[in-house]
Image (spheres, grey):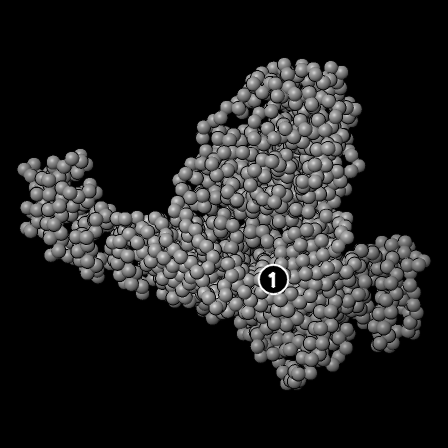
């Protein structure tokens, strides 16, 4: 117990200290404003802290547009090391995620054309930081609909509040979306209008209970008039198809995304017709692991709103049906400034469903100047700067297979490209889970009302690559 | 403003709107005069009474901070609002305060009292937030206040506040490291916290403040393991990495034996034995020494950690998966490490940063444990869209995984990669091919040919890289590859890439003796084009000329001189210098320089073949998943992963006194928790069905017990040497007991292997003296160190025991738990027919692992020290847990050993005897998920790896029955089956004897009168009137200790219930002619009543 007297003493002491410290404070204020070069920055804190020290958000043109420090301030100049590495890497994707500088370590992620650069002072598992930074980006996405520079700048106060809640002294504190949304209301157009009129705020006036409850991912007191639970089973086919059309590698990566709007504390269990299909599963923390182990049933009290329930993998190759095939003939003539390009795409094992949303992307060799192509279906674009050819095909009808053919203009005098470019294919099949996974039933316990339940299946191409 | 701190109240009157006096504050406004105007209006807004204006101002200020602009001059204006009622203003003020407090320490102090008030708020969230901000203000003056606040918050009712306290600890520590000792106290306190909310944060604080105080973890180790699955993801990572370090200091390496066995099972076995037997005489035959080596048995706590972390491999968080993976890599036995591969491969689908880190770790792992990732080879195939850094890492992994069988596929993949447009990647691929060629001899020629073809590649980098790799490959076996060198020589006509030309020339020069005819010709051609060559080529031409001159001066003398002359007038001074230098060296001159005599040595020295190995080799000395591992350099604050200890530290330090581990808070709906009923019914059905299917093998019955493997005999010898003389006296051997002993030994081995190995030498010598058969009966545990005094007595009694097993107990109550095992063969045969509870079997005394380790020392000192609570004897007969038929050949019996259970004194120690009567080995025996009534807890026995047909094993488990006779139900799992079993304790087993004097007894009895006293009259049958029969029957029924008694017709016994420690006093007043009165005094009336009933039944039977 600190008594009243103690408090006043502290304040008195403070005032006498005030005189002594004034000089010091003025000095530190001025020194902080001077931008120091790399290497000149030094440890500002007395102790060595762990985990995340500071965060800088940097856009593609190299502007630091947001900084947040959880401990003592680290000068922006530390980012010069990052810029250096960025320059060396040439390509944004090749910036090493971990950079060592004389006094700090920089761990960065690249998301949506933004770099999230965190400053670390001591040993920490790099994945810990990377995972956290992605969680931050996910949260921005969740709050603002997009994780872009503009969105962050527009909502800088909310961003700051979020960062303040997500990390305490560099250690993650509240990262569950349900909890954060109780602490800090996401902006909506309606709310911002109301706020501007009434002068009220985004900060929730009730304090979150989730952090205190046994179920840290779900907020309390959820109420809906329409109780709904939707599950999207999304499967992506990752494949490498070689020149001859045979499958080098294929596997299915699936996720079940849920959108749960149920009142109260529903306890759900989701069962599958063929759960043994799932080879390797990772779970949202809400799922009772043991129940899955023993019965292959997903039993959980869901968070409110959108979340990813599980992601899974079906890797045994013979199970993976490849829904499309590509016929291709790409050739560059020696000592000539042109080449031929001809691809045709067709359906294969589509289980009676239409394949739609087909897009073919080809990274052409650097010597390609331009392409003169004709297509029987859809449209194509070729970007002469990035050398990316994109062919937007649309649906496939088996009667008439879409094809794209024509001439490729090469830089004259340059040697012909050694390798034919690989084709990256995107497609989508609605109402089909290519692995054959089927949801059997969803049961709800703990609440009395009858929820509306829905399951949707989609198959997409993941990293689907055809070597030519 | 009522809540504002004192300072602002002083000024409050003058700080109204429109008064810019703060702007003149020299500490704030001076430097940023350009911002002055704008800040001025912010100050005005902050000084109004309208919350909306304040909020607007604060938002603008926070936006400034976010952009990295200095807003420190607003400090005084902002800090006044710390007590603002509006919660959002307050929050933003906090944000500001935490950012600038360090720079404006004096003014920051003004806010402290607000937080101090907050710390006393009835709302836990306000208390927590006050502590959070208070501890974030980095002002050294407030250290004492922070310390006080943390201490108080650490004992707050709310776990959330305690969590905040844990977060505050490192903050305070970084502010003032002198507080360490006090902070450690707080950490110690918080470590004992049982909530998942606190666990992660406090371990983080521990890691930051006092990672060296590993001793603080002991008591909390099991709790942390059990809580782990319910902790939030970030906490899990921190806890797992701390536990990895902990396990490395506390347990023995699970791979120490495996690695030896792997090379050559038998040899290793003997070899390791010899190590141990050093000094014991080398003529010891291998056969004799073979069994003395204790197989490694994992500490149950080590197993606990592995078991409880495994489900986390399925976490959605890559960080958690990686943490578990590194834990398994560093701690698990080789056979189990494989489980992490699948999870790691899954992470490869994640963000590219995650891929980058995971691949680095996979690369390191794949060098050590190639087999682990082999099934996932294809997951590392490279896509043209992967970023280069990912491609190169995948390539590294592919190269590490390549072996004799998969090399064709790998090479085919590589062929695709070589044509990639990404030249860095192509270069790396060529290097990878070179590495495959050196590692796998079979494909060396194929690779070399492939590489030679690459020499005609248009890309300079590819050619250069190929030549370099070819050069390295040729250096390994130059003699066989004259052809390739010739081919390379021909290439000089076509290849224009200077680097490649230079490399070829170097090769020809180096191996000119293999191409004696071509080399001079090449030189001739080069001499022709010399002036047009690039500099590096010119240098190599000079080199070639010099080497040829030395080996073949007849043909090349003139050419060399020509080349040197050309070089002499070259534009490049390097070349001119080199020419001059070379000429002096090789051409003999009048001066006859000392150097020219050594010219051959200088130019034609054999050059060592370069080693092509992974850059990830040996990286595993850094803890995987760490920053240091990633950077391959020690990062600040990195803590080395300690090596396994030579001998395991005392495992009993982790025993927790009053805690029932099963009672630790479990959450509704968390991963770990799950109760469900139908499973039971299902399985019992299955069992029944099986029962019907299974034929009844009547003849196999007898086999299960007595079978024993020859090598098990000497195992028992590892028992204390001090005993063996007396033991040999007992004279009878029992194979069954041997088997049990062996297993007990193994258990003990976990705790005290080192001690045993020390003893080994002695044992060896002893062995020669003692005949094998007798040794076998020397089945005992260390605890009978105490019994050395009564050895002779015992040996005689052991025979008596066969008839009246408990009779001798009376004479030497505390001395020995050793019961002659002689009876056991017959018992095994009998037990199907006799009611088990009255079987007077005394299984060999078993002290569970840690106790055994503790007592090992005592054996040697021959002391009579004995824990007075050791039960006089274990006397309840075997009961069937699982019938041979129901268990499909697995027979399981249990006995109550009456030993204090080492893990938890409240637990009843139950010995489970397994024997395998089937004809296939039973593997992976362990306890499955217990489904227990409230309060009942089980300490499972360590998994029994394998039980060969006909073999038996014994394990000890502890059950806390909570002073009730409810049955403990649990599953016995083998690799393939699960059996539902239940153990119901007789009431007499729920207590442990207490020794007291007659007076004490009477005093205690006086306190337990009235409702607590139960009296019953009975008639003692004729057979049951002798002293020792009565005592034996009572002690057989209940685990009580005899209390000395003055009168001859009265018997007194005392004990305490295990869980609650209530006294149980039993008095038997025997009157002449068989009439007797039995009195039981106990607080626990139910126990008293049941005990009376049981004792009467036993006495009157």
Secondary structure, mark 1, is strand
The answer, for residue A289, to whether it is visible in the render is no
In this rendering, position of residue B456 left or right of residue A442:
left
Image position, residue B222 (x, y; %): 65, 53
In this rendering, position of residue A258 left or right of residue A238:
right
The C terminus of chain B lies in quadrant: bottom right
Image position, residue A395 (x, y; %): 51, 61
In this rendering, position of residue B1042 left or right of residue B273:
right
Residue at 13% across, 41% down: B531
Residue at 21% across, 61% down: B480
Among the 4 quarters of the image, the one containing residue A165: top right
In this rendering, position of residue B579 left or right of residue B186:
left
Judge by depth and name the residue closer to the eye, A98 or B824. A98
Q: Which residue is mark 1?
A: A457
Pinpoint the chain carrying mark 1.
A
Image position, residue A261 (x, y; %): 71, 53
Residue at 93% across, 69% down: B1017
The answer, for residue A259, to whether it is visible in the render is yes
Total count of labels:
1
Residue at 50% across, 63% down: A396
């Amino acid at each position: 117990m600190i008594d009243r007297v103690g408090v006043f003493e502290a304040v008195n002491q403070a005032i006498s200290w005030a005189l002594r410290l004034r000089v010091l404070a003025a000095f530190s204020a001025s020194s902080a404003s001077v931008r120091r070069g790399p290497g000149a920055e030094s440890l500002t804190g007395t102790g060595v802290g762990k985990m995340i020290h500071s965060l800088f958000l940097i856009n593609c043109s190299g502007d630091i547009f947001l900084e947040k420090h959880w401990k003592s301030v680290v000068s922006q100049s530390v980012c010069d090391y990052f810029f250096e590495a960025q320059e060396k890497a040439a390509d944004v994707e090749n910036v090493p995620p971990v950079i060592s500088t004389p006094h700090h370590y920089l761990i960065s992620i690249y998301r949506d054309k933004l770099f999230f650069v965190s400053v670390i002072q001591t040993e920490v598992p790099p994945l810990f930081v990377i995972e956290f930074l992605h969680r931050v980006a996910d949260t921005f996405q969740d709050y603002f609909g997009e994780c872009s520079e503009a969105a962050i700048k527009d909502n800088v106060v909310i961003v700051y509040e979020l960062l303040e809640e997500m990390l305490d002294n560099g250690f993650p504190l509240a990262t569950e979306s349900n909890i954060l949304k109780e602490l800090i209301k996401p902006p909506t157009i309606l709310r911002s209008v109301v706020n501007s009129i009434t002068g009220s705020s985004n900060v929730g006036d009730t304090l979150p209970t989730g952090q205190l409850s046994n179920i840290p991912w779900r907020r309390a007191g959820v109420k809906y008039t329409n109780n709904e639970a939707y599950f999207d089973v999304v499967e992506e086919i990752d494949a490498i198809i070689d020149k001859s059309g045979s499958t080098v590698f294929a596997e299915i990566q699936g996720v079940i995304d849920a959108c749960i709007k149920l009142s109260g504390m529903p306890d759900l269990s989701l069962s599958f017709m063929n759960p043994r299909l799932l080879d390797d599963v990772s779970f949202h923390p809400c799922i009772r692991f043991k129940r899955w182990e023993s019965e292959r049933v997903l039993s959980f009290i869901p968070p409110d709103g959108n979340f990813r329930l599980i992601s899974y993998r079906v890797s045994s190759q013979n199970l993976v049906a490849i829904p499309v095939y590509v016929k291709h003939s790409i050739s560059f003539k020696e000592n000539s400034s042109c080449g031929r390009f001809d691809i045709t795409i067709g359906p294969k094992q589509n289980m009676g469903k239409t394949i739609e949303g087909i897009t073919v992307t080809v990274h052409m060799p650097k010597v390609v100047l331009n392409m003169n192509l004709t297509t029987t279906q859809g449209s194509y674009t070729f970007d002469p700067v990035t050398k990316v050819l994109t062919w937007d095909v649309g649906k496939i009808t088996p009667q008439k297979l879409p094809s794209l053919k024509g001439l490729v203009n090469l830089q004259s005098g340059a040697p012909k490209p050694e390798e034919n470019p690989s084709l990256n294919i995107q497609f989508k099949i609605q109402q089909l889970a290519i692995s054959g996974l089927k949801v059997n039933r969803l049961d709800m316990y703990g609440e009395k009302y009858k929820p509306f339940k829905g399951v949707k299946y989609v198959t997409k191409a993941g990293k689907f690559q055809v070597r030519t | 403003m009522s809540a504002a701190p004192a300072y602002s109240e002083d000024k409050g009157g003058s700080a109204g709107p429109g008064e810019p006096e703060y702007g003149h504050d020299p500490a704030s406004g001076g430097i940023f005069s350009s911002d002055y105007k704008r800040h001025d209006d912010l100050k005005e807004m902050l000084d109004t009474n309208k919350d909306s204006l304040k909020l607007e101002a604060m938002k603008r200020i926070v936006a400034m901070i976010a952009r990295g602009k200095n807003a420190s001059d607003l400090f005084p204006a902002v800090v006044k609002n710390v007590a603002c009622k509006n919660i959002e203003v307050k929050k933003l003020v906090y944000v500001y305060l935490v950012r600038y407090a360090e720079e404006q320490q004096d003014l920051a102090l003004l806010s402290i009292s607000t937080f101090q008030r907050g710390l006393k708020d009835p709302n836990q969230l306000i208390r927590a937030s006050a502590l959070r901000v208070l501890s974030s203000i980095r002002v050294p003056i407030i250290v004492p206040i922070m310390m006080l606040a943390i201490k108080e918050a650490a004992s707050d009712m709310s776990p959330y506040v305690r969590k905040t306290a844990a977060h505050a600890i490192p903050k305070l520590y970084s502010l003032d490291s002198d507080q360490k000792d006090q902070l450690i106290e707080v950490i110690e306190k918080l470590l004992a916290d049982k909530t998942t909310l606190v666990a992660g944060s406090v371990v983080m604080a521990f890691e930051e403040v006092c990672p060296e105080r590993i001793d603080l973890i002991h008591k909390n180790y099991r709790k942390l393991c059990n809580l782990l699955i319910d902790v939030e993801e970030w906490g899990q990572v921190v806890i797992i990495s701390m536990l990895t370090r902990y396990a490395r200091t506390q347990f023995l390496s699970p791979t120490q034996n495996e690695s030896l066995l792997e090379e050559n099972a038998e040899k290793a076995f003997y070899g390791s034995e010899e190590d141990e037997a050093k000094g014991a005489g080398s003529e010891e035959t291998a056969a004799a020494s073979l069994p003395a080596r204790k197989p490694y048995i994992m500490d149950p706590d080590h197993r606990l950690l592995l078991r409880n972390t495994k489900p986390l491999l399925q976490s959605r968080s890559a960080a958690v998966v990686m943490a578990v993976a590194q834990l398994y890599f560093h701690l698990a036995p080789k056979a189990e490490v494989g489980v992490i591969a699948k999870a790691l491969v899954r992470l490869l689908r994640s963000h590219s940063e995650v891929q980058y880190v995971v691949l680095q770790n996979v690369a390191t792992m794949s060098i050590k444990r190639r087999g682990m990732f082999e099934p996932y080879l294809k997951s590392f195939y490279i896509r043209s869209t992967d970023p280069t850094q990912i491609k190169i890492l995948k390539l590294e992994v592919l190269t590490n995984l390549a072996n004799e069988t998969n090399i064709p596929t790998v090479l085919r993949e590589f062929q695709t990669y070589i044509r990639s447009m990404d030249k860095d990647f192509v270069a790396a691929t060529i290097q990878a091919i070179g590495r495959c060629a050196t590692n796998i001899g079979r494909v060396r020629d194929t690779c070399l040919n492939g590489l030679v073809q690459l020499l005609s590649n248009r890309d300079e980098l590819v050619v250069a890289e190929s030549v370099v790799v070819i050069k390295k490959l040729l250096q390994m076996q130059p003699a066989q590859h004259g052809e390739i060198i010739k081919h390379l020589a021909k290439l000089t006509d076509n290849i224009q890439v200077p680097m490649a030309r230079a490399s070829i020339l170097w090769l020809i020069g180096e191996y000119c003796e293999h191409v004696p005819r071509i080399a001079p010709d090449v030189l001739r051609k080069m001499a022709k084009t010399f002036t047009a060559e690039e500099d590096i080529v010119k240098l190599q031409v000079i080199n070639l000329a010099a080497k040829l001159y030395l080996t073949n001066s007849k043909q090349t003398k003139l050419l060399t001189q020509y080349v040197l002359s050309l070089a002499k007038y070259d534009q490049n001074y390097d070349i001119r210098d080199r020419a001059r230098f070379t000429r002096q060296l090789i051409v003999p001159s009048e001066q006859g320089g000392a150097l020219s005599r050594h010219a051959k040595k200088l130019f034609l020295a054999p050059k060592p073949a370069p080693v092509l190995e992974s850059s990830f080799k040996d990286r595993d000395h850094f803890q995987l998943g760490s920053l240091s591992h990633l950077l391959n350099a020690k990062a600040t604050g990195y803590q080395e992963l300690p090596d396994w200890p030579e001998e395991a530290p005392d495992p009993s330090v982790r025993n927790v006194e009053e805690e029932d581990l099963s009672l630790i808070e479990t959450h509704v709906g968390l991963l770990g928790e799950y109760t469900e009923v139908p499973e039971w019914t299902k399985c019992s059905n299955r069992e029944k069905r099986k029962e019907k299917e299974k034929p009844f093998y009547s003849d196999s019955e007898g086999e299960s017990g007595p079978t024993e493997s020859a090598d098990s005999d000497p195992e028992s010898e590892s028992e204390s040497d001090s005993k063996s003389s007396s033991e040999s006296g007992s004279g009878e051997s029992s194979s069954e007991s041997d088997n049990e002993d062996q297993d007990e030994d193994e258990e003990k081995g976990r705790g005290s292997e080192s001690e045993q190995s020390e003893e080994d030498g002695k044992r060896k010598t002893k062995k020669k003296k003692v005949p094998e058969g007798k040794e076998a009966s020397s089945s005992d545990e260390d605890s009978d160190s105490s019994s050395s005094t009564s050895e002779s007595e015992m040996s005689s009694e052991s025979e008596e025991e066969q008839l009246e097993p408990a009779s001798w107990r009376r004479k030497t109550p505390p001395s020995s738990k050793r019961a002659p095992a002689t009876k056991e063969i017959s018992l095994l045969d009998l037990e199907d027919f006799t009611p088990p509870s009255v079987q007077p079997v005394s299984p060999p005394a078993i002290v569970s692992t840690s106790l055994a380790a503790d007592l090992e020392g005592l054996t040697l000192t021959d002391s009579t020290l004995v824990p007075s609570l050791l039960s006089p004897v274990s006397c309840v007969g075997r009961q069937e847990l699982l019938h041979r038929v129901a268990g499909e050949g697995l027979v399981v019996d249990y006995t109550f050993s009456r030993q204090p259970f080492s893990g938890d004194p409240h637990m009843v120690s139950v010995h489970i005897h397994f024997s395998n009567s089937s004809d296939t080995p039973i593997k992976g025996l362990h306890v499955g998920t217990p489904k227990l009534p409230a309060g009942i807890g089980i300490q499972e026995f360590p998994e029994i790896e394998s039980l060969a047909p006909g073999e038996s094993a014994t394990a000890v488990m502890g059950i806390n029955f909570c002073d009730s006779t409810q049955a403990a139900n649990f599953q016995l799992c083998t690799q393939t089956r699960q059996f539902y079993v239940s153990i119901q304790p007789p009431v007499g087993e729920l207590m442990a004897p207490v020794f007291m004097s007659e007076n004490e007894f009477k005093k205690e009895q006086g306190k337990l009168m009235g409702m607590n006293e139960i009296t019953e009259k009975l008639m003692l049958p004729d057979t049951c009137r002798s002293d020792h029969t009565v005592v034996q029957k009572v002690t057989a029924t209940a685990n009580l200790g005899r209390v000395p008694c003055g009168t001859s017709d009265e018997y007194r016994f005392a004990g305490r219930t295990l869980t609650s420690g209530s006294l149980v006093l039993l008095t038997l007043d025997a009157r002449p002619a068989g009439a007797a009165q039995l009195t039981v005094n106990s607080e626990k009336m139910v126990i008293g009543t049941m005990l009376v009933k049981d004792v009467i039944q036993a006495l009157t039977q």
